[in-house]
Amino acid sequence: MNQYIDSSAKLGDEVQLGHNCVIMEDVVIGNNCLIGHNVVIHRGSVIGDNVRIDDNVIIGKTPLSSPRSIFKVAQNLEPAHIGSFCQIGANVVIYAQCKIGERNLIADLATIRENVKIGMLNIIGRNVAIENFVEIGDRNKFETNSYITAYSVVEDYCFVAPGVITSNDNYMARDQERFEHFKGITMRSGSRIGANATILPGKVIEPDGMVAAAAVVTKDVPAARIVVGSPAKCFRTVPEPQLLKNNLDTKV
Ligand SMILES: CC(C)(COP(=O)(O)OP(=O)(O)OC[C@H]1O[C@@H](n2cnc3c(N)ncnc32)[C@H](O)[C@@H]1OP(=O)(O)O)[C@@H](O)C(=O)NCCC(=O)NCCS
């Protein structure tokens, strides 16, 4: 097999590596990991036990920075951490200083930027983009092509449908005043966003709040209310059988 494994890297028992893998300095890989072809694991990354990593994945990538970028990339970011029993699909890119808990599924083509913290048992769908400085709790679902903007918080048991767009800058890159207002979105536990909805900067979706498909959310969404339209307006209350308290499944 053609591969580079740095002499300082520590691989656990029963680790399988595909062709052309590159495992850099001080990487630690736990037991029983299954790693595909062309996987690059950057310096110091820590991978738990029983992790599956598919072809062409990059873990611990250093962010790029343009002279025009508003936020300068910190030097010497900490390595990435991937918890045990995670499954990481093909072509996923996980940046440095990401802390990803146990039993998450990260599907093909997803990108998770630096300084992101993710709990456990989340499903992060195909081509989902999670920007920097995002915090995600446990048991959330992000469906295909959804976009979570920088400085957002997603608590637990939230649902983000395909094509959802979130935003954090109402000034759209003009005016120094924007730095005082720059803010990601907040999804409180059990909140849900329907397909193709857009959430404007800083908006909060309160517990069990629900955003209808294609809505444009310009105000906070009250707890357990459904909002519809552009601009989104309260439509009705979330039906009792759909409330999180009636749908908790903590078996896994
Ligand atoms: C908001 C929602 C839950 C309402 O469902 P519902 O209670 O079954 O509503 P109905 O289909 O009976 O529609 C009631 C009215 O609201 C309107 N409406 C429903 N959904 C709407 C939406 N997303 N945007 C604008 N109007 C909507 C309907 O046109 C109808 O209007 P009318 O009374 O003038 O005819 C649903 O339409 C929705 O948006 N679901 C999200 C689906 C989704 O994105 N799933 C993601 C996983 S794939």
Image: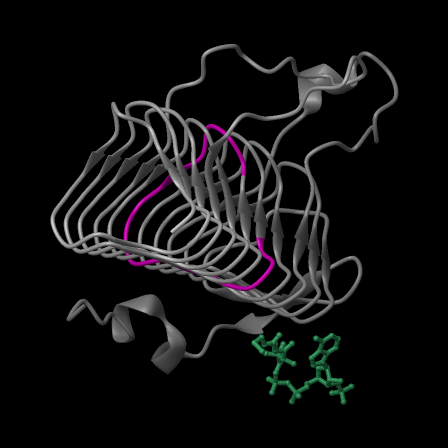
Q: Quadrant of ligand 1?
A: bottom right
Residue at the outermost front position: 1
Question: Residue at coordinates 34% horizontally, 53% vertically from top-left?
Answer: 156
Residue at the outermost left position: 13
Q: Looking at the image, which is closer to me, 50 or 68? A: 50
Left or right, residue 145 beside residue 90: right
Left or right, residue 214 beside residue 160: right
Above or below, comparing residue 60 to residue 34 in the picture: above
Q: Looking at the image, which is closer to me, 211 or 156? A: 156
Q: How is the image coloured?
A: one colour
Rendering coords of residue 56 (x, y %): 52, 52
Q: How many marks?
A: 0
Left or right, residue 11 beside residue 241: left
Q: Is residue 132 magenta?
A: no
Q: Quadrant of the C terminus?
A: bottom left
Q: Which residues are magenta?
A: 113-128
Question: Residue at coordinates 32% horizontally, 28% vertically from top-left?
Answer: 6
Residue at the outermost right position: 174
The part of the image, by quadrant, that contains residue 210 is bottom right
Rendering coords of residue 188 (x, y %): 43, 49
Above or below, comparing residue 236 to residue 138 in the picture: below
Question: Residue at coordinates 53% horizontally, 38% vertically from top-left?
Answer: 152
Rendering coords of residue 214 (x, y %): 73, 68
